[in-house]
Amino acid sequence: MPVTKAYPFEPEEAPPEYRGIPRIDPVLCIGCGACANACPPNAVLRIDDPQNGTRRIVLDVGRCIRCARCEEVCPTGAVRLTTEFEAATDDRDDHVEVVELRLARCRGCGKYTHYTERQVEKVLSLIPRGILDFDRVREKLPLCSECKLKLTVLNATKFGEVDGL
Amino acid sequence: MIAEFEARFGPILEKRILGEKKVLYTIMARPEDFQDMVRFLLAGQNVRLFTMVGTDERAVEDAFSITYWFADTSRGEILGVRLYVPEDRPVFPSVAQFHRGALWFEREVQDLLGVEADGLPDRRRLILPDDWPEGVYPLREDFKYSESPLGEKRYPYVRPPEGTSVHAIGPYHIALDEPAHFRLFVRGEEIVGVDYRGFYSHRGIEKLARGRLNYNQVCFIAERICGICGFCHSTAYAQAIEEAAGVEVPERAEYIRTLLLELERLHSHLLWIGVAAHLVGFDTAFMEVWRIRERVMWLAERLTGNRKTYGLVVVGGVRRDLLDYRRELVERELNAMKREFNDVVEFLLSSSGFIKRCEGVGVLSKEKARAWDACGPVARASGVDYDVRRDFPYAEYGDLSFEVPVEKAGDVLARATVRIEEVRQSISLIEQVLDAMPGGGILADFGDIPEGAEGISAVEAPRGENVHYILAGDRNAIYRWRVKAATYNNLQTVPDMLVGYTIADAPLIIASIDPCYSCTERVQVVDIESGKSRVVRLGVGICR
């Protein structure tokens, strides 16, 4: 096993097991932020902009410790650790990967909710058809927390189930 | 130790049982007994000061608590003595007056918690930066982890003795791999005294764990405490939590942990042997040893996905399994390594240059090693027969057979010999693990960790014992996490080793304990640019 190599003049391959720089697949990402919750060094952030209705998942590779917790918790397999290891750059911004997603609008009041449109789609795709009243669920789904609260109270009073209140 | 202690002091104390052979006693009212108890415990033949924890328990107990943990190495018993120090008068009697190993612990608790040790021989600042203001204590609960106050810069160095000059090594020096500042007082070539100022690389890890991490996130942060023995730290941390939560780790996970712990010892010792050869100017041996070390690093990368940070331990087991094709890799590399290692050791030890530079240099007597609570190869080279793997078995060490090499000379050569023999033991341990590896699950399931649960665990890192103490808080967050790395004790012996030898020997003597500064220094950080303090906050400047 030679130790002295011509690297960086000839390419160097990392083994297949290597945990390298993580990449987020912007097509698969639903913006749930599970990665941001799991990340020990806070390298992944979930930043909402409720005015413009966007959510950004911001991954700072320079802060990342390559533990692969994000990969483990991602429900759609959007975050994957590559075998890339060369992170040197003269521009700090090269380390930052951003996925921008639209927030879903509330069906009740029209304000932006805490979920992205893709999260709503994902939840709908998870519900098995025929077991639940699918259209009713669909109607309720993108509701902001305030409208959800109102609806719950309304439903509860309708059916007389207000014992706890 | 526990039985004798109980017979003598038991009735006046409150007793808490943490586990088999692990007991904690708390003194609620009578601090005057405290010194007697510590004296009584330390008088024991095989008793050592394990670690010391200061906790801000004002929210629960209206007091700070100081806990001294002792370990009886011959019986495998661990005993804690906890003293509550009232908030309005935070003073407790110093142990360092009669047991030098407690010196840094007490200086640390004074820095970080503002609890004073009465009668402390050295009252200077240990951990906080030189320009940290007086009266601000970062580990108190009312101090936010993002704060960074500024004070005036001053640090009282020891005055050099009459007729000597000061020769400074560090904070940055070609012979040091991390920042540390040794001020050698020399008369001619001879070192007559040493003053040490360290703790330049604090990262605020203990406060961080209290501030914003959850249990499993800490495993990965713990791994970053040390650049060499990170896996030992994450394992020690996970074991402490497992003890607090009463988690039974699956056997296969224990075997995988053992395998990787030994792999880490291999690469660390090979690194050290190489560095030692380099420091005596024997660079051929240095390159040869590091070539062998590269096999271990490569193996670690294939097994875990990274050369150094394995990222494998989580509370309750390990994250990834070792698949069969990897077993063949381990066997192949070990076989090649065994042969090459024997050759290089023969080559190294046949060099009279190496032997003469190491023999009789930096002698640490057994008494001094015990007084400073030295551990690991440093203690074993001085005749202290102590190894956490054997005396407080964890992971699978209880079921495997290995020998603990002990030398008597206490010089640099003895430390090298101990490490060389440990490499051989590690190879044998890995082979045993491969043979006996059982099947089954690798991760145990468990629920919430009860508030107030405590755990203490030690792992024999390549340099000695890493002791992690954990006190669980509410909502699955850590209340207090205390890390004691092996170098914390070993570094304190260095001034004793240096005195009487020449400046030319100093780098080799310092290196002979295999110091790991970042391991030792893990508590607080201030970011200062152009005289102003600034908190580095993630997201600012990145997300426009």
Image: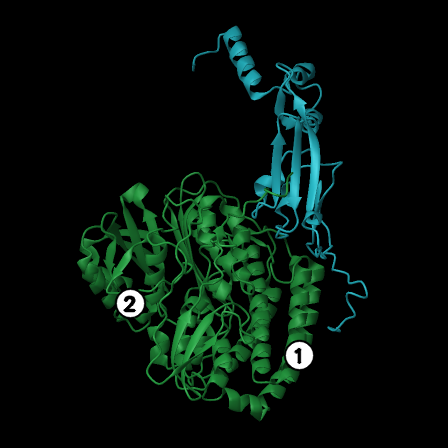
Chain colours: A cyan, B green
Q: Which residue is mark 1?
A: B287
x and y percentages locating residue B81 in the rendered image: 28, 57
Return the residue nearer the eye: B156 or B75: B156
Farthest residue toward the front?
A: B530
Answer with mark 2 or mark 1, whichever residue precedes in sequence: 2
Bin the neighbour count of mark 1 within 10 Å (Cα to Cα): few under 14, some 14-19, many 20 and up. Answer: some
Bin the neighbour count of mark 2 within 10 Å (Cα to Cα): few under 14, some 14-19, many 20 and up. Answer: many
Q: Is residue B459 visible?
A: no
Horizontal relation, residue B19 to residue A139: left or right: left
Horizontal relation, residue B182 to residue B420: left or right: left
Q: Quick one: SS at disc 2?
A: loop
Q: For the point 69% across and 59% down, which residue is it? A: B324
Pinpoint the chain carrying mark 2. B
Q: Which residue is mark 2?
A: B96
Q: For the point 60% across and 85% down, which residue is it? A: B281
Return the residue nearer the eye: B192 or B44: B192
Position of residue B187 relative to residue B147, above or below, is below
Residue B20: give its label. none
Q: For the point 33% across and 67% down, which residue is it? A: B103
Position of residue B366 relative to residue A155, above or below, is below
x and y percentages locating residue B384 in the rendered image: 39, 77
Q: Is residue B329 visible?
A: yes
